[in-house]
Image (cartoon, rainbow, N blue to C red):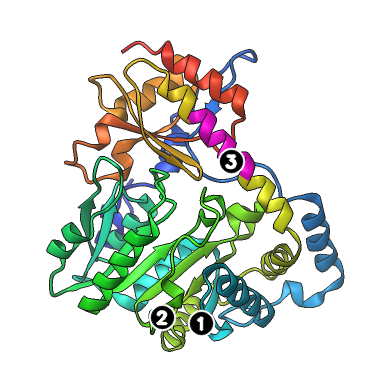
Amino acid sequence: MTDRAPLNPTLAATFPPPVMEARRWLAGATFPPDRPLINVSQAAPVDPPPMALRQVMADAALHRPESHLYGPVLGNPDLRAAVAATFSRRYGGAVGPHQVAITQGCNQAFCAAITTLAGAGDQVILPTPWYFNHKMWLDMQGIDAVPLPCGDDLLPDPERAAALIAPRCRAIVLVTPNNPSGAEYPAELVGRFFDLAQAHGLALILDETYRDFDSRDGPPHDLPTRPDWDRTVIQLYSFSKAYRLTGHRVGALIASDARMAQVEKFLDTVAISTSQLGQIAALWGLGNLGDWLAGERQAILLRRDAAVAALSGLPGWQVKSAGAYFAWVRHPFAASSADLARRMVAEIGVLALPGTMFVPQDDPVGPAHLRIAFANIDAMRIAELAGRLRGLQV
């Protein structure tokens, strides 16, 4: 039976959520106890927040009545101030609380940023391979995603981006460390994109969801130190990965005070305010979990090294880039990764996302690659993953 009510054509034409699609491949599959599924499909922590943080949240739920109520649309003032102070210290620039909005996760921060910038028929430049939720939101809004193919080093080229700028282009989006490739964009490269965006009157949206797992010890770029940086830059951040708050949906958007008035309209319409318990947790984490987060970062970096070593040792396989939670890997088979990823579930008990989910349909890069999200498997399981891939017959 077909629903007689109309469907929004841009929404209907948008591809299904890739992680949910991949999970459906598990329907009917069974995995023996001695060979359980290795799931490297999703880039989100699977463990709960540390016990001390859970205790803070439980105490707030029991004893702080405001934790169950609406809060300010742009976020709680104490958390906005703490985010501003943290960003100012991290980048050596001046970020004020009035330049911070707290959102329901970083995905909502991206949606808010785009909504303030572009409408149907406008264009936004996305380096490929791209983060699929960014592409999905643009498609839903009738905004044209202009692909900017990355080089073999998985870094975007500002000169190639300049050639793509058209009259209806509104923004360039960078994700660093990158999802899906893991590539860490050099500060000099980010600066060149800032100069390009500024010269053309575009926004530079900088998604730094995985910033806390960057292998570099210093600031990843210097944009907040530049004059009038907030007239060009929109920075996005997520507490989900830092403090394992995925289910509580807390992110941040940093932009000009003038843009905040537009962000507030969007947030008030779609959510009103971010979860109070999540905001309380994020604030406590910023003040108390620095050492714990440093340990989490070190653990992820060790897993990255283990994944690169294990996957690079497979005959014919090539790790093109790795960082944060991800490795972007070229497989040696003639089959498309779209078919290969499905077969891997049944044949070797591995769930990974095919490269085809991160590129335009006609892009030849996608079929040749897989995204391996290694952050949730330890060194022993990484070695087991490599062993299963070694035995894959196509």
Secondary structure mostly seen in magenta is helix
Instruction: Quickly name the residue at label 2.
Output: 230
Helix, strand or loop for disc 2: helix
CB atoms at circles 2 and 1 under 8 Å apart? Answer: yes
Which residue corresponds to mark 1? 99
- Give the class, few, some or many, for how many residues have Cα within 10 Å of label 1's Cα (few <14, many ≥20): many
**Which image quarter: residue 204?**
bottom left
Q: Nearer the viewer, mark 1 or mark 3?
A: 3
Where residue 318 appears, x then y in whole percent? 34, 27
Q: Does the image show residue 137? A: no
Q: Which of marks 2 and 1 is nearer the N terminus?
A: 1
Q: Mark 3 to mark 2: distance in Å?
A: 31 Å
Magenta segment: does it hold 299?
Answer: yes
C-alpha separation, residue under disc 1 versus residue under disc 3: 31 Å
**What span is in magenta?**
298-307
Label 1 residue SS: helix
Decide which of tag 1 and tag 3 comes sooner along the chain.
1
**Residue for badge 3:** 300
Asked whether the residues under the numbered discs 1 and 3 touch, taking CB atoms below 8 Å apart as contact, a structural biologist would say: no
Query: Could you say which is closer to the camera, residue 263 or residue 365?
Result: 365
- Image position, residue 271 (x, y; %): 54, 72
Whether residue 363 is in magenta: the answer is no
Which quadrant holds residue 174?
bottom left
191 or 67: nearer the viewer:
191
Tell whether 106 sits left or right of 152. right
Residue 241 placement, left or right of 48: left
Q: Which of marks 3 and 2 is nearer the N terminus?
A: 2
